[in-house]
Image (cartoon, rainbow, N blue to C red):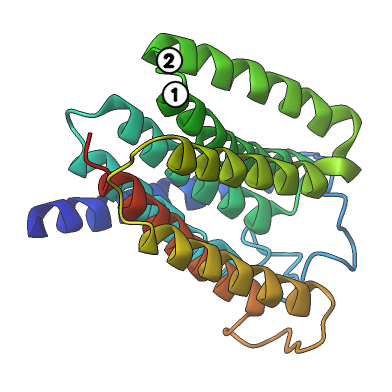
Amino acid sequence: MKNQHLYAIVSTMVLFIIASYIFSLFQELDYTVATCMPHKCFCEAIHHQSYIKQFSNTVSSFSFVYLGILIIFQNQQNKLFQIFGLFTAFIGLGSAFFHATLSFLGQSFDLAGIYLLTSFIFVYALYRIYNLGTIESMILLIIINFVLDIGLIYTPELRRYLVGLLVVFGLLSEVFYIKSRLVNIQTKWITYSSISIVLAFCVWVVDIQKILCYPQSIFQGHALWHFLSTLSIYFLYKYYRSEKF
């Protein structure tokens, strides 16, 4: 177990170094800026001349990467949980890309990662409710995310509403699964997960509305959103792992 944590830490550090190099190369390109530019990209100050535009928001994104890699290492025999870990890590890399570059491409990758994980919650519930096969579940995931990613290009203003809908559908599907089956699972973990994401959302609102805003501080509300969201995913993972089939 200790080795798995060590491997995850080292892997995350390596990915951070590689990502930083990619961000420095991206800085030299002519790219379309994110839709939040120039004044709505959360509270943290934007360092326009740096290849990492928002340092705290970028670095804190790697909490997702660490957790995702750890989940992958802990589930060598469970492909679905490895996919869950991969999607978690992808959220972190997409978020880091977004905050480092504040580009439309980074914004798209950020949302694509969130879509992947939230759609996984929905599909994993269907997988257990209807005894779907792994291939069927993967096809469903691909179809859902293809439609959502097309929407990112043509209707980016709907992105937050779609995330909310996916979370609601996922949670309702999970509730239906618990109620319709005699499930041996520790529901306390999904309660903790729900509390964490609600707290995270409250922090997100306070930060983006700049209610408590200190742009030059290393302590940023949006970074706290990243940590609380990572904690929510960790509790969700514990919930899934607690199920006895």
Out of 207 and 102, give the one closest to the viewer.
Answer: 207
Quarter of the rendering occupied by the N terminus: bottom left
Say which residue appears at 88% left-offset and 58% top-offset: 37
Rate crowding at label 2 as few (under 14), some (14 to 19) or many (20 or more) other CA atoms within 10 Å. some
Residue 190 visible from this viewpoint: yes
Q: Please tell me how crowded label 1 is: few (under 14), some (14-19), or many (20+) other residues with Cα within 10 Å.
A: some
Q: Mark 1 sits on what residue?
A: 127
Relative image position of residue 168 (x, y in whole percent): 67, 47
Please state if 15 lies on the left or on the right of 123 as rendered.
left
Name the residue located 66 percent from the left edge and 64 percent from the top edge.
50
| Residue 187 spot, x, y in % from top left | 38, 57
51, 232: nearer the viewer: 232
Q: Is residue 123 above or below residue 191?
A: above
Q: Amino acid at mark 2?
A: Leu
Q: Position of residue 66 (x, y in %)?
A: 35, 55
Q: Where the C terminus falls, by quadrant?
A: top left
User: Which mark, by number, is residue 132?
Assistant: 2
Residue 108 relative to residue 129: left or right: right
- Residue 27, above or below 52: above
